[in-house]
Image (tube, grey):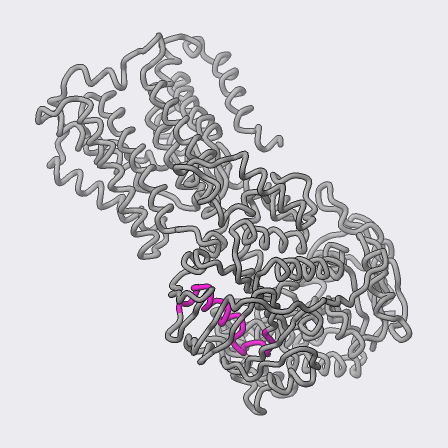
Amino acid sequence: MIQRLLPFLTLIALFVALSIASPHFLTNTNLSSVVRQTAVINIMALGMTLIIIAGGIDLSVGAILAFGGLMGTMAMERGYPIPAGIFIGAFAGMLWGVVNGFLATRLNINPFIVTLGTMGIARGLTLIVSNGLPVHQIPQRFSFLGEGNLLGVPFVLWIVMACALAVHVILEHTRLGRYAYAIGSNPDAAYYAGIPVTFHTTAVYAIGGLLTGLAGMVEASRLMTGQPTAGQGYELQAIAAVVIGGGSLRGGEGSVIGTLIGAFIMGLLSNGSDLLGISPYLQQAIIGAVIILVVWVDELRRRKMSR
Amino acid sequence: MLLALRNIQKRFGGVVALRRGDLEVQAGEVHLLLGENGAGKSTLMKVVAGMIGRDGGEMLWQGRPADFRSPKEAAANGIAMVHQESLLAPHLTVAENIFLGREERLPMGWVRRRRMAEQAARLIAEHGFPLDAGWRVERLSPAGKQLVEICRAIQHGSSLLIFDEPTSSLSESESQAVFRIVGALRERKMGVIYITHRLQELRSVGDRVTILRDGETVHTGPLAGLGTDRIIQHMVGREVTAIYRREPLTPGAELMRVRGLSRRPLVKDISFTLRAGEIVGLAGLVGAGRTELCDTLFGIHPPDGGTVEVEGRAIRVKSPREAVAAGIALIPEDRQKNGLAKALPVGYNMTMASLDSLSRFGFLRHGAERQRAGEFIARLRIRVDSPRQLAGRLSGGNQQKVVISKWLARGARVFLFDEPTRGIDVGAKVEVFEVMDQLARSGAAILMVSSELPELLQVADRILVMRHGRITADIPGRTTQEEIMRHAALDDGNLKGEVIQE
């Protein structure tokens, strides 16, 4: 039980520690900037939660984010309305998810390798299509997505909450979610039970891609550019958020609330490092170390459970 | 006295695995260690073999207090264990596995491969095993792997050998070979501790017996004069009849008709029918193709040829999905691997195959789902605290019932039970038989694979015998083990074919 509460307690401890350590932490501007900074990782991590629960992994999300963001902003540059641009960005992300799912299930390639490959392909295509140059001609009002406020709260927080609710409903109240748990927990047993494993695994990757594409549009809105090099290293942060929140890389375990907490822990770590003047280079190393630490703790818990 | 254990205690977290483990083994005796699953047999043996530490109690090895901190230390002192599950390196050869971890080395870490291969070949020949030192272990069947484990243990020149259910995956002839080896070890004045679940094999190997129940030694003494009923009573702690008698039914309509079914290399031209209310046993040696037949019928390996009809309709099964849709259910041999999601709640496992009928537009109907899970927990008398309990935490018998409920919830009509009682306690076996009987009475047809002939004789209305992928006999009604074995036995000199699995 204490293990389950650990992420939550860590988040609170981190929050309290930062409040004491820096006078700039507990301010409206800083907190809403934490929310905005975390939102992109948060949305990606929600998709990653589904994928990891279903026993998969997606290393290509950083590249998909850039691809989606580029497609959406290019559409707007060519005069498509803002909602159409957002839709196109998210849809482009979903297509990559379908590709990942197809390769992992139909061709039966390890998802780690599949998404390592599509990571390269998606990034390469993004650079080719954009010629390596960012897209700047974006309607001014598009910035509302990443920087606007609604009812006194950053608009992205509403988006995160809506995505969280959607993923929670999928996991707990739909057949797809139940199958994701079953496939992740024991793919053989799922197959023997007659579950259409290929279809549902692909669907899970597709939803992950869709959310990543949406995150790409949020990122583009925050930067007000379609950046072909956006999202590098984000896959690490998204996976870390899920794992910190109790998701197991062996599949079958994970939750929306855990992932949200995990993403906010990541957000606070990075915000705190900024406030305390810790080098951003060191931050990367810290994230890597945190992932290893969390998986190790999870491994210890498992060993204890199974004697 | 070779080994004496007094008052050994061991707990894992909050779970007490051993309360009071007592055991004494002499040189030159075969000592049987009995008990239900979870009674603490394996834990006690792991303490002896240095795989886990103990929390309390005393261990004397050859008269001196001992405390082995690793399997290596125990092995150096002459204690070796033959494991129940294969702990071999699949990509290495038989010889390399026999010497794994104690390779003969020259300076600079140079390994003397040829010498080890020769020694392994000599060891294999000496005991007459159907093995070749050069084979890669991944090609071996479970039985073949078990033989390698045994070679590994005896190669080391140990004075105490621990067998943890050595014959659970072996065919009858191979089990006989194991008993011969155990007998030979006794002749050489070695001590043997032998853990087993199969009561009928006790008599041929054991001298004395120690029985554990709930982590305590409840009986120890000579085997002669101790009746099987008494043994079971000690194991279970109450009176249980090991003999299950089933009232046969008059079979109803034909539910399944199989004609000329083939799947290379182990299913050849199989034809049979199953009727409603019928339990048909499927006997045969390990490697005869029984499991492969079930897998083919269930679509795990699609057939190369032949036809299958269910309730008069021809079906083409290319994956379990189609088999499930046609009303076929498989209770797989390896329950943990193929039947259960151990980390998920019992309730999820029960409804896993029937969510189509428990959801509307892709959304789950939680109420209906809970109700169905509750219904089966009551009907099959599954011992759980709640449907939310994780399936991995249940005993083998209860896990098996969860797997069965998965198919009941789906409304399957044809049930393929592959070794349904493997790894299940004596008391729970009878309950599994009762569930099968209930199924038959409610109009299902059952095909039951079992390597335990007495079980088949108790439960089945009719017995099919397979040999080398073909059905060699269809024996109705009461028969004998000898009759079955006559049809199942392999032609002499063909034992090598038995050990290799393609």
Within the image, what quadrant is residue A305 found in? top right
Name the quadrant of the N terminus of chain B.
Answer: bottom right
**Is any part of residue A162 visible from this angle?**
yes
Residue B157 occupies quadrant: bottom right
Q: Is residue A125 left or right of residue A165?
A: left
Residue A197 versus residue A43: which sits nearer the camera? A197
Identify which residue is drawn at 67% across, 82% down: B177
> How far across and how far down the image is residue A243, in percent?
46, 36
Residue nearest the observer in this picture, A237 or A199: A199
Give above or below for B263 relative to A158: below
For the C terminus of chain B, give its image quadrant.
Answer: bottom left
Q: Position of residue B110 (x, y in %)?
A: 50, 73
Is residue B299 inside the magenta stretch? Answer: yes
Is residue A60 shown left or right of residue A226?
right
Residue B179: x %, y % from top left: 72, 79
| B314 displayed left or right of A128 | right
Name the residue: 48% across, 30% down: A258
> Position of B64 compared to B383: left or right?
right
Q: Is residue B486 magenta?
A: no
Boundaries of the magenta span: B282-302
**Where is residue B361, by image quadrant?**
top left
Considering depth in this image, is B188 or A249 the residue closer to the camera? Answer: A249
